[in-house]
Image: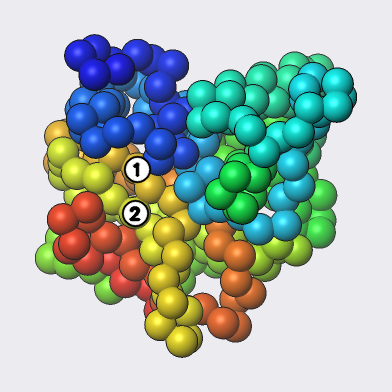
């Protein structure tokens, strides 16, 4: 994708495996393509590299082939196939409880995206919400307010999971074009990216575009070990700090 943008590259963008020229081109594309922006939000948990999510079996595994030689394109395709299968399995039901995951064996990390609550009380009724999973998670919890740059406000809702900590972010007062990341900072100073996204020129939570941004992701640390979360731009500016 060196000279043109493909809609199907949203998975590769979410996994961070596009080369720099392609990543920049696709970031610009997100500002005008609602379908890609919506799919990117669905895949936002991928960037968090959630621990404890097991590998997926596919036809190659069943045939005796190992998963260690999967290339990036195969990983993206496998993620898409599993998500499509999960959506088909949910049709006609009232419970979201599926999870999509892939294992990048060559890199030694597990990457996944969760679309269920895993909060001990069950799941989210599909027919009862007009919002996305990030906004649902934020509205269902008790937000921790953050300290923002001038004009920027927001907060986080945190959930303890078996694999670590899930974070749902609300962000207001940002205009683009920007690339941002939600970064977790441990009490020992270690940093982990929870999720990343692009802010279109119109922005979020600003005059003319009043709706806030909602994104979510996960980090493989238990909540007591986390000092704070930061929303940072690709240029190194901190837009929001949430001390937990």
- Decide: few, some or many residues near mark 1? Use Cα within 10 Å; few <14, some 14-19, many ≥20: many
* Residue drawn where x is 60% and y is 71% of the image: 221
Q: Quadrant of residue 102?
A: top right
Check residue 65 in the rendering and tell me which mark sits there, or answer none.
none
Instruction: Please state if 215 lies on the left or on the right of 96 as rendered.
Output: left
- Decide: few, some or many residues near mark 2? Use Cα within 10 Å; few <14, some 14-19, many ≥20: many
Question: Foreground residue, 100 or 76?
Answer: 76
Q: Quadrant of residue 103?
A: top right
Question: Foreground residue, 67 or 49?
Answer: 67
Q: How is the image coloured?
A: rainbow
* Residue drawn where x is 70% and y is 62% of the image: 163
Height in image: 17 above or below 213?
A: above
Instruction: Please state if 26 lies on the left or on the right of 67 as rendered.
Output: left
The number of callouts visible is 2
Q: CA distance from mark 1 to mark 2?
A: 6 Å
Which quadrant: the N terminus? top left
* Residue drawn where x is 40% and y is 82% of the image: 189
Does any portion of residue 90 appear in the rendered image? no
Q: Which residue is mark 2?
A: 181
Instruction: Please state if 121 lies on the left or on the right of 173 as rendered.
Output: right
Ranked by sequence position, the earlier of labels 1 and 2 is 2
* Residue 176 coordinates in the image, percent (x, y): 16, 41
Height in image: 121 above or below 41?
A: below
* Residue 215 coordinates in the image, percent (x, y): 44, 47
Height in image: 107 above or below 155?
A: above
* Residue drawn where x is 63% and y is 33% of the image: 69
Seen as rendered, the residue at the extreme bottom is: 188
* Residue 13 coordinates in the image, percent (x, y): 39, 33
Check residue 197 in the rendering and tell me which mark sits there, or answer none.
1
Instruction: Please state if 158 lies on the left or on the right of 1 as rendered.
Output: right
| Mark 1: secondary structure | strand
């Amino acid at each position: 994708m060196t000279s043109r943008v493909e809609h199907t590259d949203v998975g590769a963008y979410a996994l961070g495996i596009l080369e720099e020229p392609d990543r920049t081109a696709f970031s610009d594309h997100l500002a005008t393509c609602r379908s890609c922006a919506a799919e990117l939000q669905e895949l936002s948990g991928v960037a968090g590299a959630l621990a404890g999510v097991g590998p997926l079996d596919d036809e190659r595994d069943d045939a005796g082939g190992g998963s260690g030689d999967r290339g990036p394109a195969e990983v993206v395709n496998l993620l898409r196939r599993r998500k499509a299968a999960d959506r088909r399995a949910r049709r006609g039901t009232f419970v979201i409880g599926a999870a999509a995951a892939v294992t990048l064996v060559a890199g030694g990390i597990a990457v996944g995206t969760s679309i269920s609550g895993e909060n001990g009380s069950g799941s989210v009724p599909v027919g009862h919400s007009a919002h996305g999973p990030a906004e649902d998670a934020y509205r269902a919890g008790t937000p921790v307010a953050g300290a923002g740059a001038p004009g920027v406000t927001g907060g986080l809702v945190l959930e303890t999971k078996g694999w670590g900590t899930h974070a749902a972010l609300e962000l207001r007062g940002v205009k683009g074009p920007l690339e941002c990341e939600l970064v977790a900072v441990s009490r020992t100073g270690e940093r982990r990216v929870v999720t990343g996204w692009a802010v279109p020129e119109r922005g979020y939570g600003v005059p003319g575009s009043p709706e806030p941004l909602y994104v979510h992701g996960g980090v493989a640390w238990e909540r007591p070990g986390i000092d704070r979360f930061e929303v940072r731009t690709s240029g190194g500016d901190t837009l929001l700090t949430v001390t937990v």
